Each structure stands twice: as C-alpha cells, then as structure tokens.
Image (cartoon, rainbow, N blue to C red):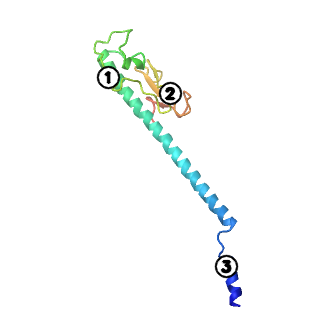
Amino acid sequence: MIHMRRKNRKKTNSGFSIIELVAAMIIMGLLAGVATVSVVGYVNRAKKQAAETNINTLETAIKTFQLECGFYPSTLEELISEPTSRTCRGFPPEGFLEKKEIPSDPWDKEFNYARPGTHNAHSYDLWSNGPDGEEGTSDDVTNWKSEG
C-alpha cells in the first residue's frame, strides 16, 4: 500500500497544467497591455508639454524682436536672420534665438506662424498642428488657448 500512495503523489505534483499556463499568459498579456497604454499616454502628454515650452520660447523671442525692431517679424526665420523687407536697427548679430535655429515641434513639423493673427488680431498666432498633423483640430497646441 505504501508503494501505491507514492505513485499517486507523483501524479498530483507533476507541475503546471496547460490551463494554468494559459491563464498566466493571459494575465501577463493584460498587464503588458495596460502598461503600454499608460506609457503611450505619458509620451503624448510629454510631447504636448514640449510643444507648449517651444511656443513659450518662440513667443519670448518674438516679443523681444518686437521691442528691439518696433514691429513683429513677418516670418519665424526673421528671428535668426535680419529682415530684408524692413530695417531693424536693434537686430543683434546672433539673432533672437539662442541656438540660431527655429525649433521643430515634437512631431518633427514646423511651427505655424501668422502675422497678423486670426485669433490674436493685434499681434500674431503661433501653433503646432499636434500629433495628428492636421490644422484646426482639438489636439493643436496654440498661443491663443490653453488646455483645461
């Protein structure tokens, strides 16, 4: 009898069943999916914040340009290269941007600039088309509205 009990014990301690392995794989897959969604959401929020920071940097340069030159630049390029259409007596040799280049938005597209602006008629509009790359959609990052 002792011999029979040992055989039964070996059969019950033989490892994981296929159902247990499948259940564990499903749980791990669900956890990985939740983690991926969280990371993607974080990356999108970080890119929007980076676009807002770049817009703030460009706004500072534009306002400094306006104070020094007496008018707003007609293009963003005039922040790094002296305007040819009008004389700016206060234009510094190094331009108004520290890196001497117009930054791209976090989605590797150019920022949009309009002078005079549609939304800011007495100054300018500055915006990124956001992650979808389409102008006028809810994901645009602009200097005339803030996220609430």
Q: Can residue 148 be seen in this view?
A: no
Instruction: Write the residue at 41% across / 24% down.
Output: 102
Label 1 Cα neighbours within 10 Å, binned few <14 / some 14-19 / many ≥20 = some
Q: Which mark, by number, is residue 10?
A: 3
x then y, percent, for residue 80:
36, 19
Please state the horizontal and vertical placement of residue 5, each as a whole percent of the image: 69, 86
Task: Label 2: state its secondary structure.
Answer: loop
Looking at the image, tell me whether mark 2 or mark 1 is earlier in sequence order.
1
The three-letter code of the residue at mark 1 reads: Thr
How many angstroms separate mark 2 from mark 1 (CA)?
Answer: 24 Å
Answer with mark 3 or mark 2, whichever residue precedes in sequence: 3
Q: Which amino acid does label 3 sit on?
A: Lys
Q: Nearer the viewer, mark 3 or mark 1?
A: 3
Residue visible at 61% across and 59% down? 27
Q: In this view, does 4 lie to the left or right of 118?
A: right
Q: Position of residue 48 (x, y in %)?
A: 47, 37
Can you name the residue that lies furthest to the bottom here? 1
In this picture, is 109 found above or below 27?
above
Name the disc covering residue 109, or none. Answer: 2
Contact, CB < 8 Å: mark 3 with mark 2? no
Q: Residues within 10 Å of mark 3 (few under 14, many from 20)?
A: few
Name the residue that disc number 1 marks: 64
Count of numbered circles in the view: 3
